[in-house]
Image (spheres, rainbow, N blue to C red):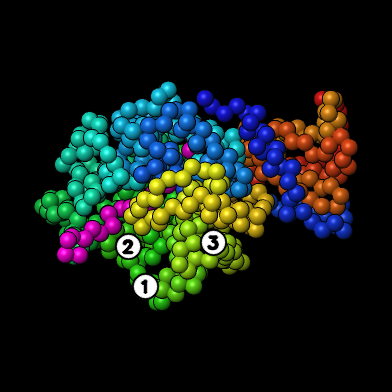
């Protein structure tokens, strides 16, 4: 069932034999310092709701599900991404072994039915992602209880059956009422259980707080049906107006999720991807949807209070679209980042790959370049990008799925268009490995310097770097000087051998190795001669 390590190594080796665009000019002298490894978060969402990304359809065997997930992770590594955000709780259900919620029907076809043969998809995803040097973030929807794409009955362990008093029917959806104290406790318990039991790198919340407004047959907006819970709040002595009360309910979820995650595992990053506009008029040229009022999402407050480790505003519009301009909104959000947390921008790769109006062939690349341009700011700017969704980056031979509409998410593109988009992104901007940016507020102590030596392989004659990364290492970096030019690599810590020259190739002149811990702290460098010191 699990992928054997030799296949992971072959995937990584194929990448490591490519020429690095970070190489220095040929006339550079051997005394040239080793180049720094780029720091950039490169992520992609993998959506399970409506089977957008994974699994491709409900009811696949465990073997087929694993094969599809491996293909996604392999593709992420090939494109030199370094993180996957996997949706594990789309609608009060679970794509993992939860003691609190039923198995998702998107996984097995029947809510409450486990995979067959049995396995735990989240444990599998974490293991396979880490084997490829990818971070794995568990993505939660905190309040949705049923999506319109769902078929079949709820399992008896679903929140709508166990606690029907918490759930509201709203349009085609079922929604847990955030004004019910039991909903807050339940949603926190579900997320924190995953923090405790799985070796995830992050916990991620999307933009669905109170639901996007539904309209009736007369095209008039239908109010969310929370009058009863608001009345009970008022009877208990609450004095907030309904809009402020709703925002307070969501604020409490965000605040407690952050604080309690840090109490359990301080190194697990907490991230939120809110709607890209805080309020129309902020900044002045911006027009559009008012998420502050309509979704009760005071996302600016969460950023300013430091209730996140990374913030991912969904800037899903083209650069030239003045009323929702990508660079204008990014600049505004950076100005609100007073706690200097990570700003990793959300991109609408699906719309870009589909060639929607206003989205030229280079639009996505131009947006990533605009993100990178902010790193020259005194505050450090934005240091990464997350793409919705992985389907927009899969190769042409990927399975085609029927388009769906999920809230403000866009129609997934045809696979051939997706392949072209991904190749442009990889060749122009992700040509080299990158380390995830460090999070010093989570701990700034450097890991120990790794041990390493260069050995001559007895049978092949190849020069191989053998690395002992150390107990705190999550990754190792290797920089090799050969013929006046450097090549740079980021490896998972489990990958402990790297061929640095063939039997008939010129020997490496210098090798520089570092260890990197899960907070992104890099050890002091270990510098070696490229000449083998022994034979294996």
Residue 160: give x, y in percent of width and height.
Answer: 21, 39
List x then y, in percent, for residue 11. Answer: 65, 37
Q: Measure how far apart labels 2 and 3 are at the Cα level.
A: 24 Å
Q: Nearer the viewer, residue 448 or 315?
A: 315
Mark toward the start of the polypeptide (2 vs 3): 2
Comparing marks 2 and 3, which lies closer to the viewer? 3
**Residue designated by label 3:** 364
Q: Residue furthest top?
A: 117
Residue occupied by mark 2:
291
Q: Nearer the viewer, residue 290 or 417?
A: 417
Q: Residue furthest bottom?
A: 284
Circle 3 sits in a helix, a strand or a loop, which is it?
A: helix
- In three-dimensional space, the C-alpha distance between marks 3 and 1, rounded to whole angstroms, equals 22 Å
Question: Where does the C terminus fall, quadrant-wise?
Answer: top right
Q: Position of residue 394 (x, y in %)?
A: 53, 47
Whether residue 203 is in magenta: the answer is yes
Magenta range: 198-219
Residue neighbourhood size for the residue with mark 1, other residues' Cα within 10 Å, grouped as few (<14), some (14–19), many (≥20)? some
Q: Is residue 250 visible?
A: yes
Which residue occupies the foreground of this view, 52 or 232? 52
Residue corresponding to mark 1: 287
């Amino acid at each position: 069932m699990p992928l054997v390590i030799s296949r992971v190594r072959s995937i990584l080796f194929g990448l490591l034999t490519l020429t690095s665009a970070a190489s220095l000019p040929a006339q550079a002298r051997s005394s040239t310092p080793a180049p720094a490894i780029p720091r950039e978060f490169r992520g992609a969402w993998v959506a399970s709701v409506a089977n957008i990304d994974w699994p491709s359809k409900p009811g696949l065997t465990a073997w087929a599900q694993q094969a599809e997930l491996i293909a996604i992770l392999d593709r992420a590594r090939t494109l030199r991404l370094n993180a996957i955000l996997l949706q594990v709780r789309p609608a009060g259900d679970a794509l993992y072994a939860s003691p609190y919620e039923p198995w998702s029907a998107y996984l097995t076809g029947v809510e409450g039915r486990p995979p067959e043969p049995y396995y735990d998809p989240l444990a599998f995803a974490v293991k396979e992602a880490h084997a490829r040097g990818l971070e794995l973030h568990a993505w939660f929807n905190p309040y949705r209880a049923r999506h319109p794409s769902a078929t079949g009955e709820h399992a008896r362990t679903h929140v709508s059956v166990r606690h029907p008093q918490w759930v509201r029917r709203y349009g085609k959806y079922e929604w847990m009422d955030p004004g019910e104290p039991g909903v807050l406790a339940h949603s926190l318990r579900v997320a924190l259980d995953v923090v405790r039991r799985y070796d995830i790198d992050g916990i991620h919340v999307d933009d669905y707080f109170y639901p996007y407004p539904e309209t009736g047959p007369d095209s008039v907006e239908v109010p969310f049906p929370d009058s009863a819970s608001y009345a009970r709040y008022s009877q208990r002595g609450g004095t907030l107006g309904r809009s402020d009360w709703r925002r307070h309910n969501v604020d409490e979820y965000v605040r407690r999720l952050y604080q309690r995650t840090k109490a359990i595992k301080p190194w697990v990053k907490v991230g939120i991807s809110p709607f890209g506009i805080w309020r129309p008029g902020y900044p002045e040229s911006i027009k559009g949807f008012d998420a502050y009022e309509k979704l009760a999402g005071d996302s600016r407050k969460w950023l300013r209070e430091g209730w996140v480790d990374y913030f991912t505003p969904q800037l899903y519009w083209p650069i030239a679209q003045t009323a929702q301009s990508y660079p204008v909104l990014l600049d505004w959000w950076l100005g609100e980042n007073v706690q200097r947390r990570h700003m990793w921008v959300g991109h609408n790769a699906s719309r870009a790959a589909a060639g929607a109006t206003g989205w030229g062939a280079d639009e996505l690349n131009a947006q990533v370049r605009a993100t990178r341009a902010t790193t020259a700011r005194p505050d450090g700017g934005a240091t990464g990008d997350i793409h919705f969704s992985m389907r927009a980056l899969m190769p042409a031979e990927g399975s085609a799925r029927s388009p769906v509409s999920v809230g403000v998410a866009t129609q997934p593109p045809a696979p051939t268009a997706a392949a072209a988009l991904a190749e442009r992104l990889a060749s122009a901007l992700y040509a080299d490995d990158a380390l995830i940016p460090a999070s010093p507020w989570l701990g700034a102590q450097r890991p120990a310097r790794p041990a390493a030596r260069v050995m001559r392989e007895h049978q092949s004659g190849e020069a191989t770097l053998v690395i002992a990364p150390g107990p705190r290492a999550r990754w190792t970096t290797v920089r090799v000087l050969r013929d006046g030019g450097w090549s740079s690599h980021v490896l998972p810590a489990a990958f402990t051998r790297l061929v640095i020259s063939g039997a008939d190739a010129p020997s490496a002149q210098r090798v520089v190795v570092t260890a990197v811990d899960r907070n992104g702290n890099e050890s002091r460098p270990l510098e070696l001669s490229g000449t083998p010191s022994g034979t294996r």
